[in-house]
Image: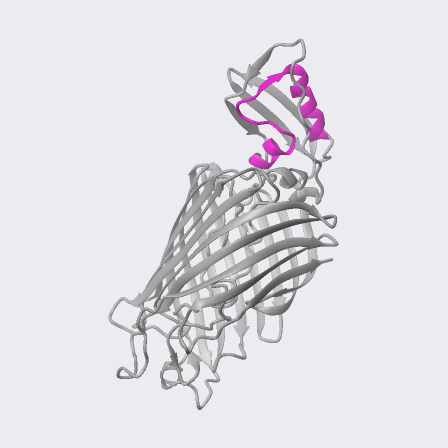
Amino acid sequence: MKAPLPVPTQTKLPTRSDPRLAPPRDTASARARALRLTLGLGIAALPVTQGLAQETRIVRNVEVRGAEFIPADQIQMTCGAEVGIAYSDYDLRAIEDCLLSTDAFETVALSREAQTLVITVQELNTRPGRIEASIGYVSQDGPTARVSFERYNLFPKTYGSVSLDYNSEIQSLSAALYHTEIFDTQFDLGIDLILGQAEYDDRSYSQNLFQIEPYLAWTPRPDLRLEAALGVRDQEIFDVDPDASALLRAEDSDAITAAYLRFGVEHAGGDLAPDGDRPRSQGGGARFGYRVTLNQYIWNIGTPDALSDTRLSAASQVPLSPDIRFLAGLKAGTVHGIDGNATRALDRTYLGADRFRGFAPRGLGPVDSGDYLGGNSYVVASFEVQRDFGQTWKTPMRGGLFIDTGAAWGLDDTLGGEIDDAFHLRSSVGASLTFDVQQTPVSLYVAHPFQKEVTDDAQILGLSIGLSF
């Protein structure tokens, strides 16, 4: 089965990388990694030979057949099968040899059907998978240890994964199963499980979360994905400090266990990496790409605490030159009680750190007695110009200049007007740098908030590094 497109999963615990993500669809260096989910290796793109004394025809479309685990676009890009190029028979044989040399396929055959180039493959590894342990640091979460397992074809046409994350503030377990073409239809069936506890040292309370979500997915076109889910969530605030905000003390109650609905739609196209909140592309030659995702949740069905939660995410990448690209991203959402009921701290959104560079995690928005309370509504826009610097000190390096702007605002209870929950725009400007150290990716940024409130908690430096073994 192929890895599905990512759709956000609701949780107030730290966002984790979705193990169902396909490898990035970046050009250049991504071609050398295109088959890494299968065997953890790849090869550099093989240039095709043209101008030989053979008949050549321009390719108007490329179709991959027989792919089970490796995404079709990765098979196409790995050895240079591109639209708009006239390939000779010799070129096609060279692409076949290139794909076979990856040791990922038992057979590879290229043929023409009118102006369509057909790549037919039979994959060699029928149960690709891996076990991985890692230690990393992310500004949002701090140092974290992870142990994970994933396997394609765990059961016939079924992908499975388990991930355990631990640090001094967060302990979480996530698991996923994804079955393609249920009952030989175009629909896929998945189920996600999240179990965790968080005790942030910058919060005056602790929280528990249990969530299980079966969902149905349909991809009528390669650029469109629809999902519908019916799940159960249990979440709880506990150990609220006696000197915490009066609002938090009032929201300290028994756990709420109830069913919920989710409806999601994603439209994407072009060359845009699916990992992380912001688009990014490895190496030069980035192409235009975009992604828009909308999710609508109905939480706590059948209880007095029913909520409507709407979330929008958009990202785009526009090449300005072979080595320079412009990135734009937007995240926005709002939550409110369906029956006039108030939201709680776990329902609201907290911005900062990687979600809003220049501010500490959960470091802006309505605040009372030193406690950041989150906002019923939020919006963050990010604009960045990135440049690939190629190999610097034998290390691929990419830098950028960015500006982030947005806000989190709105409470149902302001304690009689004592809490300022109005919209106050915040903005920051900074520089980012991404490079590898001994094949370990490192991302860092320096940001300065030039528009902020006196109660906001600024954070100048952000860092992300992960070591797998």
Left or right: 411, with 447 as reference point: left
| Quadrant of the rendered image containing residue 256 | bottom left
Q: Quadrant of the N terminus?
A: top right
Instruction: Give how far across and how far down residue 203 sits, in percent.
Output: 49, 79
Residue pushed farthest left?
340
- Relative to the observer, which residue lies in front, 374 or 352? 352
User: Residue 45 at what x, y percent from top left?
Assistant: 67, 32
Q: Quadrant of residue 218?
A: top left
Residue 93 in the magenta stretch? The answer is yes
Seen at 48% across and 48% down, the residue is: 327
Q: Main secondary structure of the magenta part?
A: helix
Q: Is 87 one of the magenta-colored residues?
A: yes
Please state the extent of the stretch shown in magenta in the rendering. Answer: 73-100
> Where is residue 194 drawn, in percent x and y?
52, 64
Farthest bottom residue? 242
Towards the viewer: 226 or 99: 99
Q: Residue at x 65, y 14 (%)?
A: 51
Residue 263 left/right relative to 200:
left
Residue 154 shows in the view: no
Residue farthest to the front? 450
Residue 216's place in the image compared with 297, above or below, is: above
